[in-house]
Structure formats: C-alpha cells, structure tokens
C-alpha cells in the first residue's frame, strides 16, 4: 500500500494526471499497472465502464471519515469527543484529521476528472452507459466541492488536472471566491443531470447508484446553502431550491423508509426498497483492499460491541446538548423515556434502558432480551454478553448508534459475508429524502407555509413524533434538521450556511450549548439500575458561591451526579466562537507549498461559465 501518496492538493493533481492511462477500477492507493489495465484494453464494454466508476463511491472518500464526524458532529455540538480541538473549535492546519479531510476531498475531484477522461476516450461502451458514469462522476465531484467550500471557504477550482499539469502552473493556482465556487458546483450538477437524463425512470430496489434525482437533490441543497451567501436570503435561490426539491419529491418515486432505524441497517434490501438514501458512500468488500471499507464503528462505540477487537470509541458520544434537543436527559429515570414518541432519539443516542433487536441478533441477554441490551451488556458478569470494560465510558451518559453494524453475526446477516478488522460494508448516507423534504420546507416557509408544515410533519410522522399544528417557523425547521440528521455529518454545515446571513445567531447558539459532561456517580447509578432495576440518583444543580465545588454533596451518599465542573458550566461549554470559526484553515503544508492558499489571501471572482466548459 502506498501510504500517504496524495499528501497535498497539488500531489493529487499530479497523481490524477499520471492515472490518465490507467483504468480507474481499483483502489487509488493500490493502482493497477498500465500493463494490466489501460484505456486500450479496459473501458471497452458497458460492464467495464460501470466497474470503472465503482471505487469513486468509496476509496477516495476514505480519509474523510474522521473529518466527517469531527467537523460535522463534534464542532457542531452534537457529539462530545474528549479534549479534541474540534470540540473547542480550535483545529489548526497541522491537525491530521483536517489534513486527511482536505486531501480526501481533493482526491475525489482528481479521480472524478480522471475517470471522465478515460470514459470519453473509450469507444466500445454504449453512449447511454458512458453518459451515466460521467453523470455519477460529476455528481460526486460536485459533492466534494460542496464539502470543500463549506469547510474551507474560498478554494481553487481544478477543472481539469491534465490541463493544469500541462501548463506547469499548478504551484501557482489561486483560490476562487465562494460565489464562484458555488456557481461551479451548480454548473457541474446541471451537467450531471443532463448526462443522467436517461436515468429518470424509477429504479425500484436499485437505488445504490446516483441517478438524475440524486444529482437534482444535491443541487437543491446547494441552492439552499448558497441562498444566504450575499448576507441576506436570496429569493431566487430559495425558489430554485424549492423547485428542485419538489421535483425530486414528486417525480423520483422515492419514499421515506417506513421505520426510521431501518435507514441505517446493513441490508441493501431494506433501504433500497424505498430509495430514501439519494447519495451514499458505498463501502466495498470487507477485508479487501484498504480504503474501500467503512471504519466508523471503530471510532464511535466501546470495545466488545463487535468481534474484531477494533473498537475504542466509547469515550466519546452524543452530547448533552443533543439529548436536550430531543427533550431527554441521561440523568432521568429510564422509565421516563419509555413514554417518548420520537424514535429518532433511540436510533441516535444509546441511553440507559435502551435495547436494540437489530444488534447482537445472535445473542440473548441474561434477562432474556434477544439482541443488545445496553445496560445489561455494560454491567453483565457473563463474559459472552459484556462490553466496555464494565463501566459507562462517555461522560454525557449516551453512546452513538448510527454508523454501527453490530457484531460478526449481524454483518453476515446483513450482507452475507463477515467483517474484518476495521472493515465493514455499512453504507454511509450523505443525502436522504427526508433532508430533501426539509430543504423544500425551509425554502418555502415564508411563501407557502402550509406546504412547509406538510413536509415537516411527514418527517415527524415517520419518526412517531407528534405533528406540529398551525404554522411552522424557520426555528422549527432548524431544530427538525438537527433531530432528523444528527450523527450524519451535516449539522456543522447548517451553522456554516447560517453564518452567511446571520452569524450572530449561529455564534450565540453554539455558545449556549451544553458541550461538556456529567460528573459524579453515574456509573454507580447505572450499575444499580442494571442489578436491581432501581434508578437511584441525586442530581445536583447548584454550585458553591466560589464555584469550586457542588453544593449539596453528602458524604457517603451514592448516586450524586451533576453537570459540568461545578453544576453551572462545563469545561467545554461556551467555546470562543467568532465569524472566522466557520472557515477551517487549509492544511499548513498546502500553504507552504503555495502561499496563495493562506487564510489572509482572498479568493478571486471567476467567470465560471466562460472559463470552464464541459464539452461532452
């Protein structure tokens, strides 16, 4: 394996140019030799062309997985992650996850450009198939730029790697301003939709690949994001977002998966039946070539949950603030949560009292539950039904649920093959139909409130949450997006787009979050609950006048729990958020390589449609 071969934007440019004669049918870190695969003996049939784009759904995205969570979830306040600079909003250009995120996104662009070159040069495949895979490449390229502009702000536009290499000026490339990058994304998606025109017919049961409506759904989200770029919301952009979203809703023949938790299961037969996931990272055969596989479970759950010895994520988990948004608290008696109606909470935050019949399907708990019983597994004396070293690890009192596949038996039941160490096939959904419903609702909330309310309530109805009555507000939709998409790498980017037109509100909300942890005897409380079914907790809410301790602590009394360092504020609360916090720095080595990437160098406006063409 060729390690960090693509360590810089510009190495990515050069690398992709070197691949122009190599068929893109393999993992980009283990590229095929020209002797075995090239444009003269590959890309000659429809099947080969289809195979040639498959890896673009996984390998180039692999190094973005941690950034996807740390930026999308930790920075946004949805997830607690120890002493991470993402929690304190202080990540800098030397942070390894930020660097990997940047390199991954640039590699998607480079590989998409390369595949398009290869396909255009082929003569054997049908034009329909060539158009389809080019449309897929353009959609994924646009998605990469969408992450880039929302993460790093002004970025260079690398339209054609080979052309840039030919000029010899890749060391001098400059950043384009945000407006130009958004226009480039829109132009790219419009071309993708044109190329995917033959793939508008319903694809029942075969929704794993990008089609016309997937590209259009992404375009709707781009328009909604771009709408505030000028400092106030653009009515024209909101109209475009609404029209594109409604076309997807009314004509794609896709539906919400009836049961919310089923969206995140392994079996393609479950989520492909409705087509709710519009764009997903489709991870490859577990145990195969490195970078083809999903590894998120390793970072997101405690040891013992799976069978591969590759789990270490129990110390992080959903935040106290996210639990607050769902209207629950880890300090509450689980019996209180038994009456909750919104199934999204349990599908996102694992808390005391929760049981999951879709995890550990091959096991029965000591008390007879078939599946995974969280508290039983945490404090069990049964070595075959035990996780996490016998204690709750995350101080928020919750653990992650999304992105987990379970144990080996669950993986085999889902896809027919076992997992391997840090190698799972669980898809990562990037854009879902419920998001499109909420995009439409937000775009029309001020012009057609009845329609906005309808689609918000459709999302809530699927989750079992009570309907909103009367009218719906932008604040309602903002919260609904958080509850629906929590854990899916999206919430930070809602803050970013809000910062375009209302930075003060975005900053205030981030500063007001409960981003820290509980302290005290939570493990004793949970263990007693596991053993005796009794929730015995003394929750303290007041601090001493000097803030040095918690008032009310009683010597010898177990089950005393309080929030933060002194029951008033936690060490991770009230981060130092400014308008600059919504733009991540470029990797330092990119700036060293090209000073035009420095934060103090502004991007330049570009006449995108005049300068860049898709002449195919």
Image (spheres, grey):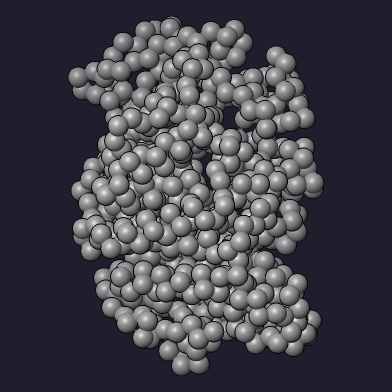
Q: Quadrant of residue 587?
A: bottom left
Give the percent coordinates (x, y) of residue 438.
Answer: 40, 46
Q: Is residue 320 visible?
A: no
Q: x and y percent of residue 101 in the render?
A: 49, 61
Q: Residue at x 70, y 70 (%)?
A: 50
Q: Is residue 507 above or below residue 174?
A: above
- Rendered position, 397 above or below 577: above
**Which part of the image, by quadrant, shows the C terminus?**
bottom right
Q: Nearer the viewer, residue 567 or 554?
A: 567
Q: Is residue 567 left or right of residue 188?
A: left
Please, is residue 585 above or below residue 266 in the view? Answer: below
Residue 101 in view here: yes
Q: Of residues 342 and 401, which is closer to you in this image? A: 342
Image: 20 above or below 399: below
Instruction: Identify the residue at image location x=74%, y=88%.
Output: 40
Residue 513 placement: quadrant:
top left
Q: Which residue occupies the foreground of this view, 12 or 207?
A: 207
How far across and how far down the image is residue 355, in percent?
Answer: 62, 24
Left or right of 605 on screen, residue 396: right
Residue 552 screen position, x and y as percent = 31, 10
């Amino acid at each position: 394996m060729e390690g960090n071969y693509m360590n810089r934007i510009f190495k990515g440019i050069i690398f992709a140019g070197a691949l122009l004669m190599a068929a893109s049918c393999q993992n980009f870190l283990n590229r095929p030799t020209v002797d075995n695969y090239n444009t003269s003996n590959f890309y000659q049939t429809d099947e080969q062309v289809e195979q040639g784009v498959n890896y673009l759904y996984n390998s180039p995205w692999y190094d973005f997985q941690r950034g996807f969570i740390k930026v999308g979830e930790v920075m946004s306040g949805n997830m607690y992650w120890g002493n991470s600079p993402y929690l304190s909003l202080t990540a800098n250009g030397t942070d390894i996850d930020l660097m990997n995120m940047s390199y991954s996104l640039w590699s998607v662009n480079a590989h998409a450009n390369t595949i398009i070159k290869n396909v255009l040069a082929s003569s054997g495949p049908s034009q329909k198939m060539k158009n389809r895979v080019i449309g897929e490449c353009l959609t994924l390229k646009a998605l990469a730029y969408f992450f880039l502009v929302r993460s790093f702000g002004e970025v260079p536009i690398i339209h054609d790697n080979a052309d840039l290499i030919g000029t010899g000026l890749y060391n001098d490339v400059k950043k384009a301003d945000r407006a130009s990058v958004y226009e480039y994304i829109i132009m790219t998606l419009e071309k993708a939709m044109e190329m995917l025109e033959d793939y508008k017919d319903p694809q029942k049961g075969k929704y794993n690949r990008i089609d016309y409506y997937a590209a259009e759904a992404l375009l709707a989200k781009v328009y909604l994001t771009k709408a505030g770029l000028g400092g106030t919301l653009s009515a024209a952009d909101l109209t475009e977002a609404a029209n594109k979203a409604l076309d997807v809703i009314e004509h794609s023949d896709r539906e919400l998966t009836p049961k919310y938790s089923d969206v995140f299961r392994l079996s393609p037969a479950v989520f492909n039946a409705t087509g709710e996931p519009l764009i997903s990272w489709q991870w490859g055969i577990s145990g195969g070539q490195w970078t083809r596989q999903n590894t998120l479970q390793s970072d997101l759950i405690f040891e013992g949950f799976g069978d591969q010895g590759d789990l270490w994520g129990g110390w992080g988990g959903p935040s106290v603030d996210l639990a607050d948004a769902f209207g629950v608290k880890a300090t509450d008696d689980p019996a209180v949560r038994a009456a909750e109606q919104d199934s999204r909470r349990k599908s996102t935050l694992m808390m005391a009292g929760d049981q999951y019949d879709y995890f550990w399907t091959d096991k029965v708990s000591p008390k007879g539950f078939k599946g995974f019983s969280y508290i039983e597994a945490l404090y069990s004396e049964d070595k075959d039904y035990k996780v996490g070293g016998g204690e709750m690890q995350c101080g928020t009192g919750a653990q992650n649920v999304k992105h987990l596949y379970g144990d080996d038996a669950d993986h085999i039941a889902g896809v027919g093959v076992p997992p391997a160490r840090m190698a799972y096939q669980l898809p990562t959904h990037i854009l879902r139909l419920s998001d499109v419903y909420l995009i439409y609702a937000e775009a029309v909330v001020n012009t057609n409130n009845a329609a906005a309310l309808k689609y918000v309530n459709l999302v809530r109805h699927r989750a079992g949450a009570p309907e909103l009555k009367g009218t719906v507000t932008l604040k309602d939709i903002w919260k609904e997006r958080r509850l629906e998409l929590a854990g899916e790498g999206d919430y930070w980017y809602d803050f970013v787009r809000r910062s375009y037109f209302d930075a003060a509100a975005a900053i205030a909300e981030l500063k007001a979050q409960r981003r820290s942890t509980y302290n005290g005897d939570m493990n004793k409380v949970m263990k007693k609950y596991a053993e005796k079914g009794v929730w015995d907790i003394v929750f303290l809410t007041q601090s001493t006048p000097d803030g040095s301790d918690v008032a009310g602590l009683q010597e010898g009394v177990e089950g005393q729990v309080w929030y933060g360092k002194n029951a008033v504020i936690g060490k991770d609360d009230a981060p130092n958020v400014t308008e600059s916090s919504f733009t991540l720095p470029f990797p330092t080595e990119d700036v060293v390589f090209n000073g035009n990437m420095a934060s103090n160098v502004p991007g330049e406006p570009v006449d995108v449609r005049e300068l860049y063409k898709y002449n195919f």
